[in-house]
Image (spheres, grey):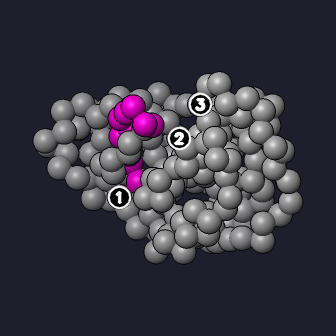
Amino acid sequence: MRAKDTEAIDGWQRCFIALSPDPETRDVLSAIPVSTRARRVPYEQLHLTVTFIGALTGEQGGALAAALAEHSVPLRPTPVTHVEHWPNAARPRLTVATLAMTDEFTKLDWQVRSLMIEHGLQVDARAVRPHITLARFGRDAGPVEHVAHTPLNLLAYFESLILYSSTLARHGARYRALATTSLR
């Protein structure tokens, strides 16, 4: 995993580890219709969050990036199962594409959590729910039409595992890749 200028980054904020879909998967996900009242996630920011971390020092980030690179394994194409509103259509906050919880995701989750523990980092206690956020709703969006929970017949391909930092901005979070490792 290449750490991007780890010496120059003084304390990485709002960090998380995510899988980056390949361009063809991004193209298909970007074409899925979303409510006109939602703000679509920009094409280049589509990702599947593996775990949230929080703040890191440059040293911690560099060490974690190196460990992730040593233990990374390619993922097979993963079925995208549904498009849903979370938490529900009556009070939507997100439109997401959910993915099947494969043995590979379970292994990746366990591997990342183990590496974080080995590096003295706090582990997010939430269970992994593989999904890619397609759009976000404002707090007062109100109910939206229910999205059919029918299979999409789509396979998601992931090309890299990325350590990101997130910066909150007026029009949504912006992500910066701090370190990247190829899964190919």
Q: Does residue 14 lie above or below 39 as drawn? A: above
Residue 16 visible to an observer of this rendering: yes
Of badges 1 and 3, nearer the viewer stands 3
The amino acid type, in three-letter code, at marker 3 is: Gly
User: Is 182 rendered above or below residue 91?
Assistant: below
Question: Is residue 107 within the magenta segment?
Answer: no
For label 1, the crowd category at 10 Å Cα-Cα, with few meaning under 14, some 14 to 19 and many 20 or more, is: many
Q: Which residue is label 2 attached to? A: 51
Is-magenta flag for residue 167? yes
* 2 or 1: tag closer to the N-terminus: 2
The answer to whether residue 74 is left or right of residue 3 is right
Q: Which quadrant would residue 56 be assigned to in this image? A: top left
Nearer-the-camera pick, 7 or 175:
175
- Residue named by callout 3: 138
Indicate left or right for 81 with 121 as reference.
right
Residue type of the residue flagged with mark 1? Thr
Residue positioned most to the left: 8
Q: Which residues are magenta?
A: 162-172
- Quarter of the picture containing the N terminus is bottom left
Is the residue 9 above or below the residue 11 in the image?
A: below
Q: First in sequence: mark 3 or mark 2? A: 2
Q: Secondary structure at mark 2?
A: strand
Single out the residue that lies furthest toward the top: 140
